[in-house]
Image (cartoon, helix red, strand yellow):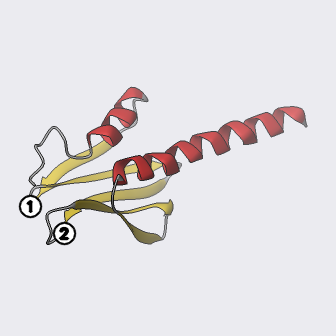
């Protein structure tokens, strides 16, 4: 099933828009391609469509140097990783204040 342009990586784009994160977004062969920097590291999210019509994404958000496939609710899985970064930062800031 083809996804509309508004649906492609929409939750991830909304998350980034809400935080005023800069990113580039384009479409390639009916799939979304999102690239961004976070803490001076380059991250990529490339949406793909399998032969059976299901969508997924390939991304390096979990391990910056290695791509990983996400399927099923791939946007939520990727967002969980990104939210984890923010939680890690909060914990580190709290720890630093305690010293």
Residue drawn at x 26%, y 39% is: 10
- Find residue 1 and report its image quarter: bottom left
- Tell me if residue 9 comes above or below residue 49 in the rendering: above
Compared to residue 2, the image places residue 94 above or below, namely above
**Circle 2 SS class:** loop
* 38 vs 97: above or below: below
In the rendered view of the protein, which quadrant contains the C terminus?
Answer: top right
Q: CA distance from mark 2 to mark 1?
A: 12 Å
* Residue at point 68%, 36% (across, down): 90
Residue 72 percent coordinates (x, y) = 33, 57
Question: As drawn, which residue projects farthest toward the top?
Answer: 18
> Which residue does the numbered mark 1 point to in the structure image?
29
Residue named by callout 2: 50
Q: Which of label 2 and label 1 is nearer to you?
A: 2
Horizontal side of 22 relative to 39 (left or right) equals left
User: Looking at the image, which residue is at 43% across and 29% down?
Assistant: 19
86 displayed left or right of 99: left
């Amino acid at each position: 099933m083809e996804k509309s342009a508004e649906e492609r990586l929409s939750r991830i784009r909304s998350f980034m828009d809400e935080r005023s994160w800069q990113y580039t977004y384009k479409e390639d062969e009916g799939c979304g391609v999102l690239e961004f920097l976070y803490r001076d590291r380059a991250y990529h999210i490339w949406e793909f469509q399998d032969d059976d019509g299901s969508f997924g994404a390939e991304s390096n958000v979990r391990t910056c140097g290695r791509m990983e496939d996400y399927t099923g609710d791939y946007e939520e899985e990727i967002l969980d990783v990104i939210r984890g970064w923010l939680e890690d930062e909060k914990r580190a800031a709290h720890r630093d204040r305690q010293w």
